[in-house]
């Protein structure tokens, strides 16, 4: 019996091992099938989605539709809704638990993207009230073909001609889609300023090339220009004479839409109230740090000045302001911002290499004057090549000062964008900010993840990069550099406050300007521009602060987890190796935490 018992136990063990092996194989097969199913779905999405917006397709590097300008009528919106609903249903049948961790991330990104697009069409309805939406499509539709050398110039110009020929149809659809009573006045005014910038694209980027193309393409371009210019002027007349007088919409989107958009656009675990609390706490902390730094600089300059141990807020304000004035004295000439930025880009690049902060990509970057049709919203931006366009340039685009500005307005602007501030801006936009981060992140093999990249990750990294550079000793012989960096971070803090305060809490222009100028030490021209931007956008101004907070939280968590194995180079290279998904997904991947799930 003893032998039989042992024999039975041995048989049971063999059977148990066989069952476990079978279960393991079954699980592995299920996971392989789930991954294959999702990857096939993602591939279909990337193949089909670009046809909905040929202009967006060009921007991501899909050039199958480069000769087509978007359809923007009710039929096109109906088609888009059906497309996103279909993918929403298909995603609901994907069991995320069966996916590999990288595919879990991509599935959540796609689910959020589909939901966001449906919300935009059905709930936000920007197509009905924002003429800037159409300006952007019309401008980028041609500019996006000519800015990068992804194909022979003649081919790109021929496609640009085809899109110009469609301006008449495009603007007719745009006018029919918009309800002037829903259009905010500020949107109409900005559209009027931007629209004629389309003519500058023709005059500066197309007309000079007419002598360099074949007779066939030249004839096509001349015909297209002859049709496009009247279409632009007709739309300009409508914007000025029909839309603007009737524009009476409220630019404030209110709590419900703001909260819904915040969750979808930022894909963060932080709620509006949590963002507000963090921002208000940081506002107090950063201003105190600025005072302590300013006090040291001030007392070094004026050693016999007595400063009390417990100064009131008015004295702190005065000391910070007087110290910032030292930075404002060193500013570029009115027409020298681009050349100044070029010099500082080379300087920042050498510092990153010297300090071994992060891998430096070899992809090209060029500083350019911002195209006219894109001006009026931001002072600078970084335009990286689309995920499918390999080896193309990134453009660090800087807006020139408006010609109509008085000398006093120009002085105000250049005090804000002094030489130290342009260094901080260059760190943010290029090195090791947007240019470096996007160049490295776009190497991640998932095209879907590159297409669905996260604004808060990208903007948060750039704000984080500003602090890293100063912490690592950039211009350490100039303590004013840290003060300027703190001032710029304070701008991100006040951005987050006014973003929701304006759209949800009805903050007035006067209160917003006071917070930016007195609280954030911004110059009048900068604050005035930000007030316009806050009216024209919602939730975007929060991305800088939210993204930075998430990056800072993630770094602290990784430092704690890695202990003595933590180095900046290792951390930065790994953090940028996953593409540009929302920070919470990168954190989950780096720390082997559960992948966050988007709400269904």
Image (spheres, rainbow, N blue to C red):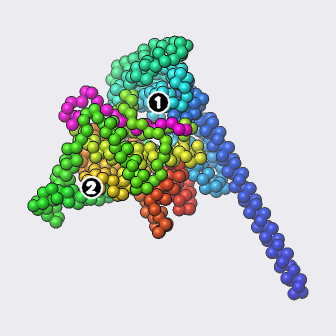
Left or right: 47, with 484 as reference point: right
Q: Residue at x 20, y 60 (%)?
A: 296
Q: Can see residue 100?
A: yes
Spot occupied by residue 353 in the image (x, y as percentages of width and height): 42, 52
Residue occupying the far bottom of the picture? 2
Left or right: 67, with 304 as reference point: right
Q: In this picture, which residue range is highlighted in magenta?
A: 390-411
Q: Can see residue 510?
A: no
Q: Residue at x 31, y 43 (%)?
A: 422
Q: Are marks 2 and 1 in contact (CB under 8 Å)?
A: no
Q: Image quadrant for the N terminus? A: bottom right
Q: Is residue 246 part of the magenta span, yes or no?
A: no
Query: Which secondary structure, mark 2?
Result: loop
Spot occupied by residue 258 in the image (x, y as percentages of width and height): 42, 44
Left or right: 143, with 325 as reference point: right
Q: Which mark is residue 147?
A: 1
Q: Residues within 10 Å of mark 2 (few under 14, many from 20)?
A: few
**For residue 222, above or below residue 558:** above
Query: Which secondary structure, mark 1?
Result: loop
Q: Is residue 402 part of the magenta span, yes or no?
A: yes
Which residue is more in the foreground, 419 or 81? 419
**For residue 249, above or below residue 454:** above
Spot occupied by residue 186 in the image (x, y as percentages of width and height): 33, 32
Mark toward the viewer: 2 or 1:
2
Q: Residue at x 39, y 49 (%)?
A: 350
**For residue 311, above or below residue 161:** below
Q: Residues within 10 Å of mark 1 (few under 14, many from 20)?
A: some
Q: Which mark is residue 477?
A: 2
């Amino acid at each position: 019996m003893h032998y039989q018992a042992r024999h039975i136990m041995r048989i049971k063990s063999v059977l148990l091992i066989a069952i476990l092996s079978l279960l393991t194989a079954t699980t592995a097969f299920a996971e392989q099938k789930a991954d294959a199913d999702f990857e096939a779905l993602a591939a279909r999405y990337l193949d089909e989605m670009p046809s909905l917006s040929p202009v967006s397709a060009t921007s991501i590097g899909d050039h199958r539709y480069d000769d087509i300008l978007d359809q923007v009528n009710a039929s096109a919106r109906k088609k888009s809704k059906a497309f996103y609903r279909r993918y929403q249903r298909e995603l609901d049948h994907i069991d995320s638990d069966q996916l590999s961790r990288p595919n879990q991330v991509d599935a959540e990104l796609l689910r959020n993207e589909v939901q966001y697009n449906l919300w935009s069409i059905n709930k936000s309805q920007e197509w009905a009230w924002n003429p800037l939406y159409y300006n952007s499509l019309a401008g980028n539709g041609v500019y996006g073909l000519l800015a990068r050398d992804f194909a022979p110039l003649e081919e790109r110009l021929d496609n640009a001609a085809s899109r110009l020929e469609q301006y008449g149809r495009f603007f007719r659809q745009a006018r029919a889609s918009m309800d002037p009573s829903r259009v905010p006045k500020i949107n109409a005014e900005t559209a009027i300023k931007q629209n004629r910038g389309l003519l500058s694209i023709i005059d500066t980027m197309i007309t000079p090339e007419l002598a360099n193309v074949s007779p066939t393409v030249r004839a096509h371009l001349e015909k297209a220009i002859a049709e496009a210019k009247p279409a632009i002027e007709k739309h300009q007349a409508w914007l000025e004479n029909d839309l603007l007088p009737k524009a009476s919409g409220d630019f404030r989107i209110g709590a419900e839409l703001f909260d819904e958009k915040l969750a979808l656009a930022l894909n963060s675990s932080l709620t509006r109230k949590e963002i507000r609390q963090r921002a208000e706490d940081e506002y107090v902390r950063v201003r105190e740090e600025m005072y302590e730094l300013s006090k040291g600089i001030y007392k070094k300059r004026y050693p016999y000045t007595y400063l009390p141990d417990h100064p009131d807020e008015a004295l702190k304000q005065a000391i910070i302001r007087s110290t910032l004035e030292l930075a404002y004295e060193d500013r570029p000439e009115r027409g020298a911002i681009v050349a100044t930025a070029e010099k500082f880009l080379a300087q920042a690049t050498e510092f990153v290499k010297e300090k071994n902060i992060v891998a430096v990509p070899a992809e090209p970057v060029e500083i350019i004057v911002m195209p006219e049709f894109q001006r009026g919203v931001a002072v600078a931006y970084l335009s990286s090549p689309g995920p499918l366009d390999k080896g193309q340039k990134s453009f660090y685009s800087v807006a020139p000062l408006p010609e109509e500005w008085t000398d006093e307005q120009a002085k105000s602007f250049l005090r804000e964008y002094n030489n130290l501030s342009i260094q901080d801006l260059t760190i943010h936009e290029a090195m090791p900010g947007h240019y470096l981060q996007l160049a490295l992140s776009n190497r991640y093999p998932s095209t879907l993840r590159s297409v669905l990249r996260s604004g808060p990750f990208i903007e948060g990294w750039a704000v984080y990069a500003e602090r890293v550079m100063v912490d690592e000793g950039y211009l350490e012989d100039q303590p004013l550099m840290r003060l300027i960096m703190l001032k710029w971070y304070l701008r991100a803090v006040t951005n987050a406050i006014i973003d929701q305060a304006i759209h949800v809490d009805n903050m007035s222009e006067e209160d917003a300007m006071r917070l930016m100028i007195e609280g954030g030490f911004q110059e009048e021209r900068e604050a005035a521009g930000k007030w316009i931007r806050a009216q024209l956008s919602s939730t975007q101004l929060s991305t800088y602060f939210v993204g930075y907070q998430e990056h800072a939280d993630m770094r602290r968590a990784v430092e704690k987890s890695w202990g003595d194995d933590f180095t900046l180079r290792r951390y930065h290279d790994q953090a940028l190796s996953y593409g540009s998904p929302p920070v919470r997904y990168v954190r989950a991947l780096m720390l082997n935490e559960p992948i966050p799930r988007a709400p269904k």
